[in-house]
C-alpha cells in the first residue's frame, strides 16, 4: 500500500510538470 501511495504522489508530480504520458503510466501502476 505504501508503494501505491508513493506511485500516486509521483504521478501527481509528473502531471504538474507536464509529463502527462508518464503521469498516466504511474497512475495506472498505483492502481
Image (spheres, rainbow, N blue to C red):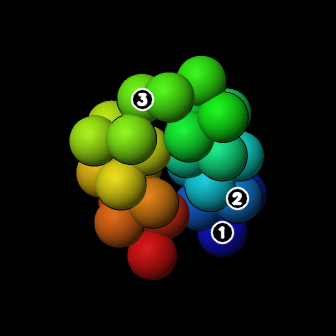
Q: Residue 1 — which label?
A: 1
Q: What's the residue at 56%, 40% (across, down)?
A: 15
- Residue at x 36% of width, y 54% of height: 24
Give the farthest residue toward the bottom. Answer: 31
Mark 3 lies on a secondary structure that is loop
Is residue 10 in view? no
Question: Residue at the location (45% across, 76% down)?
Answer: 31
Q: Which residue is mark 3?
A: 19
Q: Residue furthest front?
A: 18
Residue 4, given in percent of the width and then of the height, sits at 59, 61
Q: Residue at x 66, y 46 (%)?
A: 12
Q: CA distance from mark 1 to mark 3?
A: 24 Å
Mark 2 or 1: the one toward you? 2
Question: Residue 2 is drawn in which quadrant?
Answer: bottom right
Residue behind mark 2: 5
30 shown above or below 22? below
Q: Look at the image and tell me in which quarter the N terminus lies.
A: bottom right
- Give how far apart the Cα atoms at labels 3 and 2 are: 19 Å
Secondary structure of the residue carrying tag 2 is helix
Q: In what element is the residue under mark 1?
A: loop
Amino acid at each position: 500500500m505504501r508503494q501505491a501511495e508513493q506511485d500516486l504522489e509521483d504521478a501527481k508530480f509528473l502531471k504538474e510538470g507536464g509529463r502527462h504520458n508518464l503521469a498516466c503510466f504511474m497512475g495506472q501502476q498505483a492502481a
